[in-house]
Image (cartoon, rainbow, N blue to C red):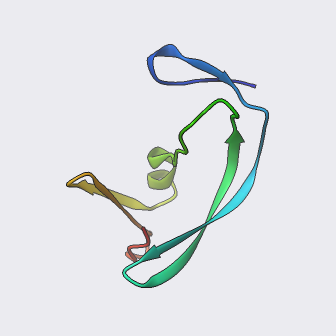
Amino acid sequence: MLVGGIDGIQMHAEGHRTIELESVYKGCKYTLTLNDILYIPRNKNNLISLRCWKAAGGKYAACHRKLTLTTKSGTHIA
C-alpha cells in the first residue's frame, strides 16, 4: 500500500494491525488501543492521527511544545 505524506512524499506500508500503547500522565498509567496502524519501515517518526482522535470523541491541546490528549469523558491521558 502506498501512503502519501508531507510535501508529497510517498512511502510503502508493509502492513497494518491494532496495537496497544502505554501512557503515564501525572503518575497514572493508561493503555491506548490504536486501530489500523500502518507499518512503514522507512518512516523514522511515529504518528498519532489527531483527526482520528477527535473523530472518536477525544480532544487535544498543544501548549509550549507539549500535546495533551483528553478522552471523550474528560480524562487527560497523555
Residue drawn at 44 percent across, 69 percent down:
71
In the figure, 58 relative to 2: above or below? below
Left or right: where does residue 67 sit relative to residue 23? left
Given residues 44 and 36, the one toward you in this image is 44
Residue drawn at 54 percent across, 77 percent down:
30
Given residues 69 and 72, the one toward you in this image is 69
Q: Quadrant of the C terminus?
A: bottom left
Left or right: where does residue 33 sit relative to residue 26? right
Q: Position of residue 9 (x, y in %)?
A: 54, 17
In the figure, 1 relative to 18: above or below? above
Residue drawn at 68 percent across, 47 percent down:
37
Q: Position of residue 21 (x, y in %)?
A: 61, 64
Q: Residue furthest bottom?
A: 27
Q: Quadrant of the N terminus?
A: top right
Quarter-wise, where is residue 14 in the image?
top right
Q: Residue furthest top?
A: 8
Total residue callouts? 0
In the figure, 61 relative to 71: above or below? above
Left or right: where does residue 53 sit relative to residue 70? right
Quarter-wise, where is residue 44 in the image?
top right
Residue drawn at 69 percent across, 34 percent down:
40
Quarter-wise, where is residue 2 in the image?
top right
